[in-house]
Image (spheres, rainbow, N blue to C red):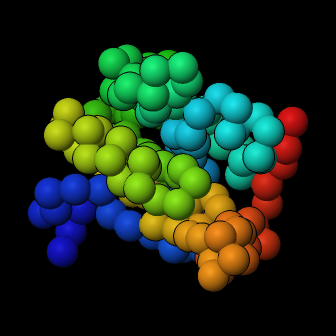
């Protein structure tokens, strides 16, 4: 199925997302977690923060699509209507999939999300980053 034939964002493993970002450096990696998560837990190197849900209300960001479009156009990333891939990442994949659906519904093409997120799912001991995710895979990340 091509990107244009889908009805939602395309899931990628953390390794596949990293590979895509390396092979297509004009693409955007957007961290959609809260401001505190982005700063305190860490984030992929090169990720731009645009919260989908943020404190204190935890409601969807009404400017999310506009902020993404500004990033794409403001950085001259779109040439003759051809825009780069947008790769979304959150803690475990749920929020980035939801935010990605909003982008697809708004008409953006080539929207992907990191299915295991930055920290992956909870393990048997209710801890993250031990089963899957960006950090688990040893991909580059930083913390403020």
Q: Is residue 118 visible?
A: yes
Q: Is residue 62 above or below residue 129?
A: above
Judged from this view, the residue extending furthest toward the front is 125
- Could you tell whether 122 is left or right of 87 in the image? right
Q: Position of residue 21 (x, y in %)?
A: 59, 58
Report whether 125 appears left or right of 65: right
Judge by depth and name the residue closer to the eye, 67 or 24.
Answer: 67
Can residue 14 be seen here? The reply is: no
Rendered image quadrant of residue 70 = top left
Relative height, residue 55 to residue 15 (above, below): above
| Residue sitting at x 52%, y 27% | 54
- For the point 63% across and 59% down, which residue is it? 118
The residue sitting at 53% across, 52% down in the picture is 89
Q: Nearer the viewer, residue 15 or 36?
A: 36
* Whether residue 49 is situated above or below residue 20 in the rendered picture: above
Instruction: From the top left corner, tell me how far across and down residue 46 is, in percent.
Output: 71, 44
State the image coordinates of residue 109 (x, y, percent, origin top left). 27, 47
- Which residue is located at x 33 percent, y 63 percent? 10
Vertical placement of residue 71 versus 30, above or below: above
* On-image quarter of the C terminus: top right
Measured as percent of width and height from the top left, residue 130 is found at 72, 77
- Nearest the eye: 114 or 124: 124
Q: Quadrant of residue 112?
A: bottom left
Quadrant where the image shows the N terminus: bottom left
Does 126 sit left or right of 60 as displayed? Answer: right
């Amino acid at each position: 199925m091509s990107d244009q034939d889908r009805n939602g964002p395309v899931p990628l493993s953390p390794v596949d997302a990293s590979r895509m970002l390396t092979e297509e450096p004009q693409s955007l990696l957007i961290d959609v977690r809260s401001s505190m998560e982005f700063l305190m837990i860490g984030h992929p190197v090169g990720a731009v923060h645009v919260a989908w849900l943020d404190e204190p209300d935890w409601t969807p960001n009404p400017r999310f699509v506009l902020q993404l479009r500004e990033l794409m156009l403001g950085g001259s990333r779109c040439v003759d209507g051809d825009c780069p891939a947008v790769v979304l990442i959150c803690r475990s994949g749920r929020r980035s999939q939801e935010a990605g659906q909003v982008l697809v519904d708004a008409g953006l093409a080539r929207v992907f999300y990191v299915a295991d997120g930055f920290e992956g799912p909870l393990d048997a001991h209710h801890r993250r980053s031990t089963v899957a995710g960006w950090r688990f895979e040893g991909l580059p990340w930083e913390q403020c």
